[in-house]
Image: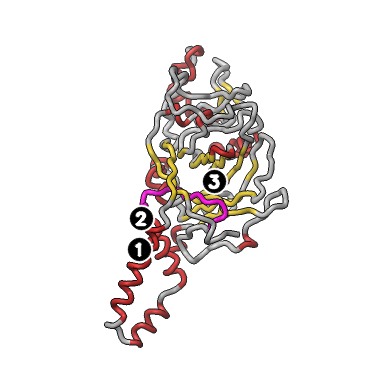
Amino acid sequence: MASESAGPAELGFVEAAPSWRLRSEQFPSKVGGRPAWLSVVGYFQVIEIVTFFCSLTLPIIVNLNKLLKYLNCYIVLFKSFINSSPFLPLVFRNQLPRQNDFYSYEPPSEDPPSETGESVYLHLKSGAHLCRVCGCSGPKRCSRCHKAHYCSKEHQSLDWRLGHKQACAQTDNLDNTVPDHNFLFPEFEIVIETEDEIMPEVVERDDEAEIIGTMGEAHEEELESMAKHESKEDRIFQKFKTKISLEPEQILRYGRGIAPLWISGENIPKEKDIPDCPCGAKRLFEFQVMPQLLNYLKADRLGRSVDWGVLAIFTCAESCKLGIGYTEEFVWKQDITDAA
């Protein structure tokens, strides 16, 4: 399911960025805000699922894009009606060949555009309209201006109260009058750096030296007692703390095929727990979202409980061709309480 020797992880960190860098054509890796849809058509499978839960949906958390293969993974939280868990994550994958009908073969320019254009993109090149509140599919529209689109009555009502009532007549400038609905998570760019493999070894040697240095002061009976009380869970949690202590601000770890960094020895999936892709291929670990991201989401203002220890994302080992559509992948949620 994963290999300990598959190479170093790539670490993700959040940074503030101008809005133009977080648009779809820039292939952004980002947190929060409206989703930056990679495919401008064929996206309705995922959006319909999100819209179905929309009045109870939290916004997109992570839009992770690996430029070389035009991959998007979207993580969404939705209300669970099945068990006592307040919210469950879903993850969707979309990838395009580098040669495609929507974007240039060459990487996008790092220079800002001469014109920033409309402040919020609420329609796709395919002609599809997006909800003014959440950025998902907007099949409903305002009955007065017929220009504002929404995913649900709840979001239409929210937008009406917060400014569309006054802006409804300004149809020529409607996309520039989108208010802050206090619904989306704060938006940041994710910047990627490769984890240093040498430093953790130094930390481990220092820890080992400290242990050896104190062994001469301890009786054999005491050492045996300590060994018995050190559980597998303690060792895994200590490894987690040691690993992230070098880069405590990391919010994401990417490494296709490497072993996830679990926060606890409890609730670790076995290979049989990871379902195969519908194409028949096995799924591999691709990346994980760290609990540090919660510090940036400010989810408490939404009046809803959002929490996790690790969100581990597993995707098709064969990167099966999906055309230009989206498919659901698998996420394993390990809670912080599992580490208690």
160 w.r.t. 281: above or below? above
For residue 246, the mark is 2
Residue type at mark 1 is Val
Q: Is residue 269 magenta?
A: no
Q: Measuring from the top left, give residue 158's x and y in whole percent.
A: 48, 29
Q: Earlier in the sequence, mark 2 or mark 3?
A: 3
Gap in angstroms between the C-alphas marked 1 and 3: 41 Å
Label 1, secondary structure: give it: helix
Q: Which residue is mark 1?
A: 203
Q: In which quadrant of the rendered view does residue 327 lie?
A: top right
- Identify the element where label 2 is drawn: loop
In the rendered structure, the answer to whether residue 284 lies left or right of residue 302 reads right
Residue type marked 2:
Leu
| Residue drawn at the location 47% of the way across and 49% of the way down | 10
- Image quarter (top left, top right, bottom left or bottom right) of the N terminus: bottom right
Residue 248 within the segment the image draws in magenta: yes
Structural crowding at the residue carrying mark 1, measured as other residues with C-alpha within 10 Å and reported as few (<14), some (14–19) or many (≥20): some
**Residue 216 falls in image quadrant:** bottom left
User: Label 3: how many residues lie within 10 Å, few (<14), some (14-19) or many (20+)?
Assistant: some
Q: Residue at x 45, y 16 (%)?
A: 167
The picture places residue 294, in percent across and down from the top left corner, at: 41, 47
Where residue 288 sits: x, y (%)?
50, 51
Residue at the image point whose x is 40% and y is 65% from the top: 238
Label located before the other in sequence (1 or 3): 3
Q: Which residues are magenta?
A: 245-258
